[in-house]
Image (cartoon, rainbow, N blue to C red):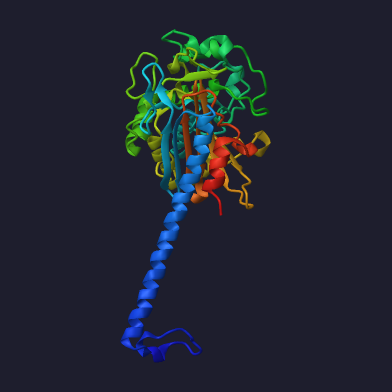
Amino acid sequence: MCERLPLGYKGVCLDNLPPMQTYRLLCVCLLFLSCWSNIQAVYAETRAEAIDRIVRKYHEKGQFDGTLLVADKGQVVYKKAFGLADRTWNIKNGTDTRFRIASITKQFTALLVMQLVAEGKVKLDEPISGYLADYPAEGGKITVRQLLTHTSGLPTLDDESGFYQNQDPDLLKPDRFLKVCCSKGLKETPGTKFNYNNADFILLGLLLEKVTGKTYQQLLTEKILQPLQMQNTGLATQETVIDKQASGYLFEKGVYTNEPYSRIQNFYAAGALYSTVDDLFLWNRSLDTHRLLSKEYTEVMFAPVPSLGFVALGSWAYRLPLPGGKKPLLIERQGGIGGFHTLNIRAPQSEASLIILSNLDTAELYNTYTKTGLPYEIMAVLLAE
């Protein structure tokens, strides 16, 4: 067999070696492979330990309670819970604790819209008056894309209006919502200025219901939760008891207090979902693998608009400079309601995820792009060379 080797080959041909030397050479090779496997295991352990050290630092400073999941190349590399889910009963957070995920909900709403776009039932650049016939005339020229990018020009739904505390059971019926929140005219010309506004995504929820003839809850269940087997995710209501759900807390001057009251269902398609880190990892994997939406429409959904602060359709997308010179593309979605602060980051090119769910308002999760804080420190370790 050795005579077939290329001219000039200087490797070892086992056919020419005595049996004992062949045996020794094979043993050396196996030993090398075993050592290399151990080196890789130590590297993975070291990375997990580095992430754990970072998270504990923030937890011990009173800046994080909650649950984290970190994944790379589609595999979980770190998952742990910190602090208390319920301070009255001294119940600890677990990796299966359910949290209000606030505006991470908007990613789900955006995907439901994009599914209809892919089916030809909705057009991104068509006025919403074509889908919501009762919309006031001035605002009817707002497009679906402008709702998804918070450039509708609508007045902002804020806490001062009392909208999120309103007990009216008909508040989110289309005619009622349009009258209460969309009849005051526009603050800006649609498409000209970014203005973060939950009203945009509440309108998208109403649009989804109008186009499909199904409730937002039905669409979530049929199009996302059941296909992905997300059994610990759903729409929260103030009245429903949700098993293993954390309570939200504020922390100021060394004192913990309960979060202020809000009627969670009033956030609707803009922020009423609850979930766990494991379920959100299933969600991220579906986005990585285009299980619910084709690659073509996924790219449309996460294409950033630099002139509007890199906002995409329901998320933000930007490149983050890391130590060593890497600039990975990140898809980021933040959320915050009362004491709940949440964050979902994907690095699609490496199929990496960072999911942070916190029930403490001191958790600083929203400054990754400034290269500071807990999420940035974790991403720097996760995506290091």
Give percent across and percent down for residue 56.
49, 35
Is 274 displayed left or right of 150 in the figure? Answer: left
Residue at x 53% of width, y 19% of height: 251
What is the number of callouts on the image?
A: 0
State the image quarter where residue 2 is shown. Answer: bottom left
Give percent across and percent down for residue 173.
44, 14
| The C terminus lies in quadrant | bottom right
Give percent across and percent down for residue 95.
38, 34
Q: Which of 355/198 is in front?
A: 355
Residue sitting farthest toward the bottom: 3
Residue at x 58% of width, y 10% of height: 160
Q: Which of 264/116 is in front?
A: 264
When the figure is inspected, residue 16 is found, relative to residue 355, above or below; the finding is below
State the image quarter where residue 27 is shown. Answer: bottom left
Give percent across and percent down for residue 337.
50, 21
State the image quarter where residue 215 is shown. Answer: top left
| The N terminus lies in quadrant | bottom left
Q: Which of 178/232 is in front?
A: 232
Q: Is residue 351 visible?
A: no
Q: Is residue 97 visible?
A: yes
When the figure is inspected, residue 104 is found, relative to residue 4, above or below; the finding is above
